[in-house]
Image (cartoon, grey):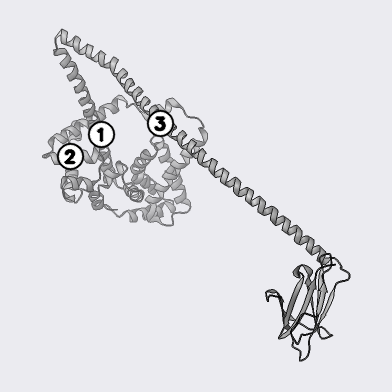
Amino acid sequence: MSTDAAPTPDEAEVATDLVRRIAAGNASAEGELAERYSRGLLYLLRRLAPELADDLRQETFRIVLERLRKRGLEDPAGLAAFLRGTARNLVIAERRKTARRRTDADDEELAQAAHPAPSQLSAVLLDEESETVRRLIGELPTDRDRQLLLRFYVAEEEKESICAELGLESLHFNRVLFRARQRFKEILARSKR
Amino acid sequence: MNHDYIEEQQVVERYVMGRLPPEEAARFEEHYLHCQECLDRLDVAESMERGFKRAAGQDAARAASIRQLALVAWLARLGRSRQLAALAMAVLVIAVLPGLLGLREVRERERELAETRSALEQERERSAQGSRTAGSEAEKLRKELEASRRDLAREQEARTKAAEQLADARRPQGNVPILFLNPERGGGEPTHRLRLPRAPGWVVLALEIDPPHQPSYRAVLQDAKGKELWRGEGLRLNEMETLSLSLPTTLLAPGDYILLVEGRRFTFRVLPSA
């Protein structure tokens, strides 16, 4: 199954070029690096430590750039892996620091962490997402496709077991998921206009 | 990691749901750090997952509400008397049900108590039976112990006696009777006589051995009836070409004796002590 991805330059080539130019003192290369990896790094950090993501992203770039300016990288093509590793290490260090500082549990804070109440805006967005899903499910041509999506997204069943129980080919499963995703994007985009 | 693989394996959705193995998740993270397309798909996948779960949760809550509303509606449709009857029934159920459950619980406990009592009774019976068996066992053991004690006393007595005899044997003894014997070459009564001393002790028999001599000799002591009383082997002659034998007097009761040494016959008579 093909995707709508535009051809992009090979990551290894781009990374090697960036590392080389930064080591040579090229300031614009530093800007390109931040631009290329900023969104991905923020996404990763939001998954690992949502409340610290913005700060840790800055810290990650600072550490990586200092390293590239001084010593470069042994494997310049592995720049993404180096960024990921640095970000993860920062998260771990931050958690250790927090754990050392805190010796008692704040019940109120724990209760909030366990049941975070969405803001009004978040609630509206969540409702919008659930409405989009309802519409999407309503548009599906067969009950089998509805079963497929519900079992995959809600029951979190594995693809193999869903295919086996519903008598589906792997290709059909992929196709249903792909179309559902595309349709979801369309409906959501239209509702936001 | 390329987009065909990501699509075929539902890597984006599985990553969002936390169902990717750690190694695969790491490879995907390195990929999406620079891949705007995958980041877009991650946003959509997260949104879809949230939407599905929220919709499912809302549907479940709605279904529960509908069931409650249906009950209220049914009650509302009833006439006043039936509403009161339903209310009375509900009150009855609320009031009586715990009591019934409690009664059931009490009966269950009573049954368990009876079982426990029965088991305890059986255990007591077994214990009493065990005590009786244990009593006879103890009696048997006591008898065995007494028998062992008697054996031990006899053993100690024998040891004491043996020790005394050993002490006597070790004690220097004077006037040890010595009987010189020559080989007998004809029949008849023994010509050599030995009178037993009053106290138990030792006697020495000195046997005169004619040539040709052997390196060692074997001697057998018999009583008059030919019963073997003692046997000695590897005996050697002394420098006077005699064979000396020390015998305890306890071995020799009054009577006639024969000593056979390699075909030679020595006879002697033991007389009671004076």
Numbered tag placed on residue B53 in the rendering: 1
Are the residues under badges 2 and 1 in a single subunit? no
Cα–Cα gap, marks 2 and 3: 58 Å
Residue that numbered label 3 is attached to: B118
Q: Secondary structure at mark 2?
A: helix
- Seen as rendered, the residue at the extreme top is B80
At 37% from the left and 25% from the top, the residue drawn is B110
Foreground pick, B167 / A60: B167
Horizontally, is B192 left or right of A83 in the view? right
Q: Amino acid at mark 2?
A: Gln
Pointer 1 chain: B
| Residue B139 position by quadrant | top right
**Residue A34 picture location, percent across and down:** 37, 44
* Residue contact between numbered discs 2 and 3, judged by CB atoms under 8 Å: no
Q: Which mark is residue A147?
A: 2
- Figure quadrant of residue A130: top left
Chain holding disc 3: B
Whole-percent x, y for residue A154 in the image: 24, 37
Quarter of the image with the C terminus of chain A in it: top left
Mark 3: which amino acid? Ser
Please state the chain letter of the residue tagged with numbered disc 2 in the rendered image: A
In the depicted structure, whether residue A175 falls above or below residue B76: below
Q: Name the kind of residue labelled 1 in the image.
A: Lys
Which residue sits at x=72%, y=58%? B158
